[in-house]
Amino acid sequence: AQTVTQSQPEMSVQEAETVTLSCTYDTSESDYYLFWYKQPPSRQMILVIRQEAYKQQNATENRFSVNFQKAAKSFSLKISDSQLGDAAMYFCAYRSARGAQKLVFGQGTRLTINP
Amino acid sequence: DADVTQTPRNRITKTGKRIMLECSQTKGHDRMYWYRQDPGLGLRLIYYSFDVKDINKGEISDGYSVSRQAQAKFSLSLESAIPNQTALYFCATSDSYRRGQDTDTQYFGPGTRLTVL
């Protein structure tokens, strides 16, 4: 079974600085997808970024980018120019390219932005 | 209007009561999911459904049942609620998977906070 691990329960960063959230996963599959979801205090789960494992190029979405290391099974999220609105819980998630499409989530990292 | 809605948003109930949480979606997706979120554990899958006639257990289905009344509706029931079912419950939807198209993403409802006393 696949597992996802986020080893940083909490992180903090100064506004306008850059922060990187870590995620590692374990799988025997070669074809899969990885996601970062954001959960602000409103508790809504919001998709931040997605990465297809068969693509070598790292995904980017405005100030958000990932460092996908397939061999190392690592998928970190970098947030540039941090803003107060980035404060939230961040979840890393894995999904197989086959089967049920169910998401396997990490434990989450709580990100605080210091003004 | 939200694409994925959940009712109620908050619910407090007592041990032994039957509870139903409802999920509706207007995205036209055929796949629907129920997850549970506990502090420090992330989200875990309870049940999922590929269509009205296809329902499957997730990793933590004990104590729960589901009903897919229509393509757009997927409800979760707790037949006899117990305190350790106190959690945040999310419904999610996705489209049938087709490689090369943006169908691999799950979209979440706003969540239902359930407290069992």
Image (cartoon, helix red, strand yellow):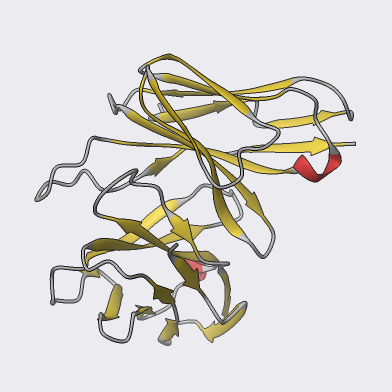
Q: Quadrant of the N terminus of chain B?
A: top left
Q: Residue at x 84, y 21 (%)?
A: B17
Q: Quadrant of the C terminus of chain B?
A: top right
**Residue A71 visible to an observer of this rendering:** yes
Question: Measured along the vertical axis of the image, is residue A63 above or below residue B98?
Answer: below
Task: Compare residues B57 and A73 and report the one nearer the observer.
Answer: B57
Question: Measured along the vertical axis of the image, is residue B61 above or below residue A57?
Answer: above
Q: Residue at x 27, y 61 (%)?
A: A33
Residue B13 picture quarter: top right
Question: Measured along the vertical axis of the image, is residue B22 above or below residue A47?
Answer: above
On screen, residue A39 versus residue A41, left or right, reads left
Horizontal and vertical percent position of residue A109: 56, 72
Residue B3 picture quarter: top left
Residue B83 picture quarter: top right
Task: Compare residues B28 and B78 and report the one nearer the observer.
Answer: B78
Question: Measured along the vertical axis of the image, is residue A39 above or below residue B49?
Answer: below
**Residue B110 visible to an observer of this rendering:** no
Horizontal and vertical percent position of residue A90: 50, 66
Horizontal and vertical percent position of residue A79: 38, 77
Residue that protrudes farthest toward the top in the picture = B69
Horizontal and vertical percent position of residue A11: 58, 82
On screen, residue B60 versus residue A63, left or right, reads right
Q: Residue at x 56, y 67 (%)?
A: A108
